[in-house]
Amino acid sequence: MAFRRRALASAVILAFAAATAFIATPGVVGSPKVASPPRASEPRSSSWSSAGFVAVCVVAAGGSLRTRRVRSQALAKSVSNDMPPQVPEVLEAPEEPIVMETVEVCSRAQLVRGAGAAAALAAASSANAAISPEWIQYDLNTGETLYDIDFDPQDPNHGFIVGARALFYETKDGGERWVSRSFANLGKGQDISYRFQTVSVNGNEVWIVGKPPLLLHSKDGGKSWKKVPLSRKLPGEPKVIVSLGDGKAELATSSGAIYTTENDGKSWASKVDETIDATLNRVSASGVSGASYFTGSVKSIKRTPDGRYLAVAQRGNFYLTFTPGDNRWLPHNRISSRRIQGMGFREPANGAEMQGAWMSLNGGVLTTCEKPNFVELGSDTKELFQLSKIRSGGIGIIDIGFRTPTEAYATGGSGVIYFSKDGGKTWAFDPSAKDLPCNLYSVKFFQNGKVGYMVGSSGILLRRTFAV
């Protein structure tokens, strides 16, 4: 019996020592401290009660759980040891660009759907008409998602739409008629897998960004195209591109790298020194909530004509800003426990001066900020954003476009459209798309706010003309 007791005591002591070693493992930030085992000179008990044994097991289990909880925090602080934080200053194209051939798929007048839409289209198309009374749907003969639309600022009649499954439309009459095009030698089956995310037009220069990583460039207004090779050293995937003129463009990636080219994409120069991951690792103690859970990419990026950027983390738990002249992104806390749905600058299409930003949160909550210094205040900008009055019914707001400093339109899930006449402080429901089973992902205005477009899922394209 005594032998069994001594054996049991030895086993318990070994279990206690193992649990202690596990809990106090060095190298893990924030590991809980426990008492050291008895020294050799101290008396040891020959037997333990069952309650003491249970307590040891509980402590060991608790240490395991707490160790796992701090692992995500330690990961954010150790990520710089596993991946290079620096963004390559210069990237060279690994090979010559591939010439792409375009084919006209269909060319026809677009149909219009919706009650009263035909009459509205006829009124808007008449020689004396200046405005259309509602948003009009154009049928592009597709059920795929449309992601972006852009028009040439030098020729407002020339524009492009891009979308899923390599959708690619062109208009030369100001959006009255759209022609579907396809890249004949994109690759067998690749036209189905590619998703064209962003298009930018400036004169004869047209750029398209796609996913999986793809960069297309035209120097003759879309008549001929080249597939620009991307360096394997590019941090992240291409997210947004802006055409800046003859052979010039600016590219932002999902990791926060920003590059410019002046030679049609043969080489790229970096505007930031480090990726967002590296920035968060360096400022992990700055109080930015959710930084340790950053997945390495952002879900949206917005850019102003003067080169300022807004980006929202993939999980929506914080946002970042970049100002020309800086060499890294500045992270900011979200303003409440709700995750960020979307965010952008308050930038009127008519060119009027306007400051601040808008932010939509999960559950259909919408806020606006009228202060320009929200990009300079570090992590805490909560006091600068004010709640807007909007009856969204919990449906998330995805995008907002300002036609003028006072008139704005918001789009979201389930085809919802809201409009504001006071700069975004209060919003009213617009029934133009209430019967459309779609999500409206983007709203943009062109020609100084005279023409507006909305694009979304199910091939939805909405257009409206306004009095200047």
Image (tube, helix red, strand yellow):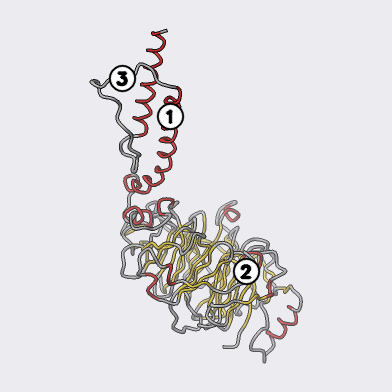
Residue 175 position, x and y percent, is 62, 77
Taking depth in this image into account, of 269 and 428 the one nearest to the observer is 428
Identify the residue shown where x is 60% and y is 75%. 453
Q: Amino acid at mark 3?
A: Arg
Q: Secondary structure at mark 3?
A: loop
Eye-nearest disc, 1 or 2: 1
Residue that badge 3 annotates: 44
Mark 2 — residue?
A: 392
Q: Secondary structure at mark 2?
A: loop
Q: Residues within 10 Å of mark 3 (few under 14, many from 20)?
A: few
Alpha-carbon span between mark 2 and mark 3: 68 Å
Q: Earlier in the sequence, mark 2 or mark 3?
A: 3
Choose the circle earlier in sequence order: 1 or 2. Answer: 1
**Up-down relation of residue 403 to residue 106 (above or below):** below
Q: Amino acid at mark 2?
A: Ser
The count of marks equals: 3
Residue ID for mark 1: 55
Above or below, 193 against 138 in this view is above
Q: Classify residue 243 by image quadrant.
A: bottom left
Alpha carbon distance from label 1 to label 2: 52 Å
| Residue name at image x 41 percent, y 15 percent | 8
Quadrant for the C terminus, please: bottom right
